[in-house]
Image (cartoon, helix red, strand yellow):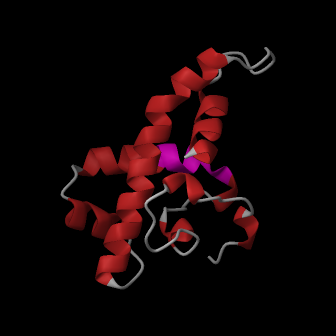
């Protein structure tokens, strides 16, 4: 979660040249929470289905409105530009523990090393 929060705080910064502060973190909380839920739900559904999901699969399985999922995908891609313009949380699923009570135990460091 810390990783998402830091990415979201950087994304939400109003002045990239100014010194980072607590306000940046506070503005990043809602986005980090949305992305954390989106990624973990994607992982749960993918594992339940036993296969990689597409955006259409996620929409069908999650019951979320189409526009909401496409907005989340846009935000995800903006937070993780190194994963590519067509990236989905599926790239992160294999990097996440199958079961954990402590989401803070999840560390995602080297995105280039993730399988495509």
Q: Is residue 32 above or below residue 14?
A: below
Q: Residue at x 41, y 59 (%)?
A: 40
In reply to whether residue 65 is colored magenta, the answer given is no
Q: Which residues are magenta?
A: 74-81
Outermost residue, left side: 63
In reply to whether residue 80 is colored magenta, the answer given is yes
Q: Nearer the viewer, residue 45 or 66?
A: 45
Outermost residue, bottom side: 50
Q: Is residue 3 above or below residue 94?
A: above
Q: Residue at x 43, y 71 (%)?
A: 99
Q: Nearer the viewer, residue 104 or 9?
A: 104
Q: Which quarter of the figure has residue 68?
A: top left
Q: Is residue 9 left or right of residue 76?
A: right
Q: Is residue 48 above or below residue 62?
A: below
Q: Nearer the viewer, residue 86 or 57?
A: 57
Q: Residue at x 58, y 38 (%)?
A: 5
């Amino acid at each position: 979660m810390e990783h998402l929060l830091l990415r979201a705080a950087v994304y939400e910064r109003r002045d990239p040249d100014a010194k980072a502060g607590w306000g940046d973190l506070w503005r990043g909380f809602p986005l980090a929470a949305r992305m954390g839920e989106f990624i973990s739900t994607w992982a749960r559904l993918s594992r339940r289905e036993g296969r990689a999901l597409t955006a259409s699969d996620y929409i069908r399985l999650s019951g979320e409105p189409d526009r909401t999922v496409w907005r989340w995908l846009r935000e995800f891609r903006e937070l993780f530009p190194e994963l590519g313009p067509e990236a989905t949380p599926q790239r992160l699923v294999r990097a996440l523990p199958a079961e954990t009570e402590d989401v803070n135990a999840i560390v995602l460091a080297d995105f280039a090393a993730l399988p495509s």
